[in-house]
Every structure is written in C-alpha cells, then in structure tokens.
Amino acid sequence: MTNEKSKIHDHQSTSDYFQGNTISPSDILVVLARQIKMILTIPSLTCIITIIYAIYFTTPIYESTSKIISSSPSNTLSQSAGLAAQFGISLPISRSRTQWVYPEVVKSRTLARSMLKRKFDTKKYGPNKHLLQILTYGNEKPGLGLDTLEILAVDKFLSMVQLTENQRTGIYTITLSAFEPHFVSELNAALIEELDIHQREYNQAKTSETRQFIEERINSTEKELKVAEGALKDFRIRNRRIENSPALQLEEQRFTREVSVLTGVVTTLKQQLETAKIEEVKKSNYVITLDPPEAPLESSKPKKKRMVILAGLLGIGFGIIIGFFREYIRNFSDDEKEKI
C-alpha cells in the first residue's frame, strides 16, 4: 500500500507540472533525473559520430603564411621628372609608384594563370604535377576542356589565397590553404616568386616606355636647339655692334636665354636616358620577403575539438528536449489509462 501511494503521489506531482501554469525548478530536476539516461546517451552518440566524421570523412586543411614588403622603386627618375618639369617638360615617370597594388595583383587572374603552369610535388598526386592538374582532375582523366579546367582552377586557387595589409607599416601577409603542409608552403613561396617576376616585368615595361619617350624628346629638343643656335648666330652676324642699342641687346639676351634653356633640357634628358637604361636592365628584387613561408605542423581546419564540443552541447540540448517530450507522453498516457 505504501509503494502504491508513493507511485500515485509521484504520478500526480509529475502530471501537475505539465497541466499547471507554472513549472518550478524542482519539477525540472525531477524530469531530468527520470530521463538522465536519455540525456547522456544522445550527446555521447553525437560526439562519437562527430569524431568518426572528423577523422575519416574530412580533409585536413593546412595554412602557410608569409610576410612581404615592396621594395620602393628608385626615386631617381621621379626626381628627374621634377627637374625636367622646371624646363616645361612632363615625363611619364611620376606615376611609377602606383604600380605597387598588391591586393589586386595577388588576387588577379593573370597571376593565377601563371601559377597554374608551375609544377609541384604532392603525396596525394605524386611528383612534378602542374598546379592545374592538382586543383582539377588529379590523377584521373580530364572530363572537361582545357579552357574550362583553367577557369575552374583559377577560381579555386584564388579562393585559397588571402592577403591582408598593415596600413601603418605597409607589410602584407599572404595566407594560403591547401591539403598538405609541404605543398602549401611551396605554393606560398612560388606565389611570392611569381609576384616578383610580375612586378619586374611591369617595371621594365614602364621603364622601356620612359626610355623611348626620353629618346624622342632628346631628338626633338636637339632640333629646337639647333634652330635656336642658328638664329643666335644669324643675329650676331647681322648685328656686330650692339653696344649702343638697348633693343638689340634685349633681342640678343632673348636668343641667348632660349639657347641656354634648351641646352639645359638636353643635358637633363640625356642624364635621365642613362638612368632609364640602368633601371631597365636592373635585376634587383621588387618583393622583399620579411617572413618566408614554412610548412605548418598542424592542420588549421577542421577544428576537431571544437566540433566535438559543439556536438556534445547540441546533443545535451537535444537530449533534454527529448527527455521532456518523453515525460510528457508518459504522463499523458497514464492520464488516459486512469480515465478508462
């Protein structure tokens, strides 16, 4: 009789908090105690499933970082442009500093296509494989055309690259992600090399344009100088005695000044021509590596510990919900039986 009374009392207490308007903390604890097996079983299962998925069904992603800074282009040409501007000549050199736009260059399709032609060694696909093959069809036969594969590979490579800039110091951080640690470090180093090659070719092309412009200006200015010198010579031949004529003296000064200005322009242009020729054949590095890439020791993705912890927390929450639902169904069934 005592056991039956206690069971009836427990049933009434549990049914009351489902039928009443309020639920006390003690009622919640009663439900949790009754459904403790379910609450512990579900998070255990979710953690086990997550561990199996993280170990056997996910591909580890490794990240390699490097820090670079631009080697400032020579200021000589810019200073020369300033000197030439004093003589009324505008050289197309003052824009040389606008070429260092690393975020746009690193994330450009032009640089990505250059990277696809490089070869790398990987454990997954073997040695000496083009990056295009590694990022698309691997060791299988390509099922798409070369143009389509190139578009897919370019998009995939650009998604692997991240570039951040420190506005205060001007230092750029390049981060690459891939499926193998040594491969991703070699990929990062190759990207820096391609960036340096791109900047060198760009600078040489701009310097070549500058050299051609200076040569054209030298030719045209020398012709003007010859005309001015001829005019001064003719004036002096026609006017041998100008001491008593202020007008003739002013005229001679004008001819002399024009010859002097043109002579200075020619001298400046020839100096800049030699500078441009030196800049054109210069082999210095345009990208300075402050922190070279290294092979990472651990994968950065997926975060296995975080995945298991989140799975456990979600499992606990889901287990509590199922526990309350089971308790509600149980009490509802008991109430129906009592009515019968």
Image (cartoon, helix red, strand yellow):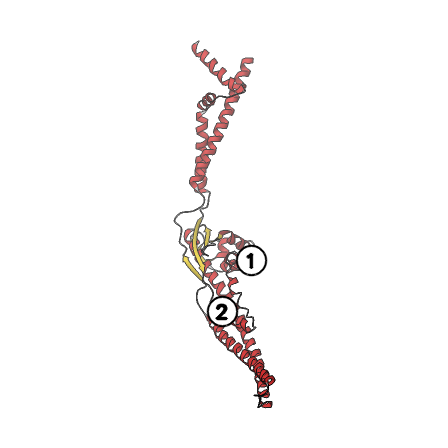
Residue 2 — which label?
none
Residue drawn at (46%, 36%) of the image: 311
Q: Residue 5 location, x and y as percent?
A: 46, 11
Q: Which residue is mark 2?
A: 79
- The residue drawn where x is 45% and y is 28% is 39
- Give 138 or 308, whichever is nearer the viewer: 308
The numbered mark at residue 146 is 1
- Image coords of residue 217 (percent x, y): 56, 76
Q: Secondary structure at mark 1?
A: helix
- Seen from this angle, which residue lies furthest left? 297
Total numbered labels: 2
Q: Name the mark nearer the viewer: 2 or 1.
A: 2
Q: Position of residue 183 (x, y in %)?
A: 43, 54
Q: Amino acid at mark 1?
A: Leu
In contact (CB < 8 Å): disc 2 and disc 1: no
Q: Is residue 110 above or below residue 3?
A: below
Q: Position of residue 97 (x, y in %)?
A: 51, 63
Q: Report crowding for label 2: few under 14, some 14 to 19, many 20 or more residues within 10 A (C-alpha).
A: some
Mark before the other along the chain sequence, 2 or 1? 2
Q: Which quadrant of the figure contains the N terminus?
A: top left
Nearer to us in this view, 319 or 49: 319
Is residue 315 something one can see in this rendering? yes
Q: Is residue 239 above or below residue 254?
A: below
Is residue 128 visible in the rendered image? The answer is: no
Q: Residue furthest front?
A: 244
Depth check: 271 or 82 in front? 82
Q: Quadrant of the C terminus?
A: top right
Q: Is residue 340 above or below residue 132?
A: above
CA distance for labels 2 and 1? 48 Å
Question: What's the residue type where badge 2 is placed?
Answer: Gln
Label 1 crowd bin: few (<14), some (14–19), many (20+), radius 10 Å: few
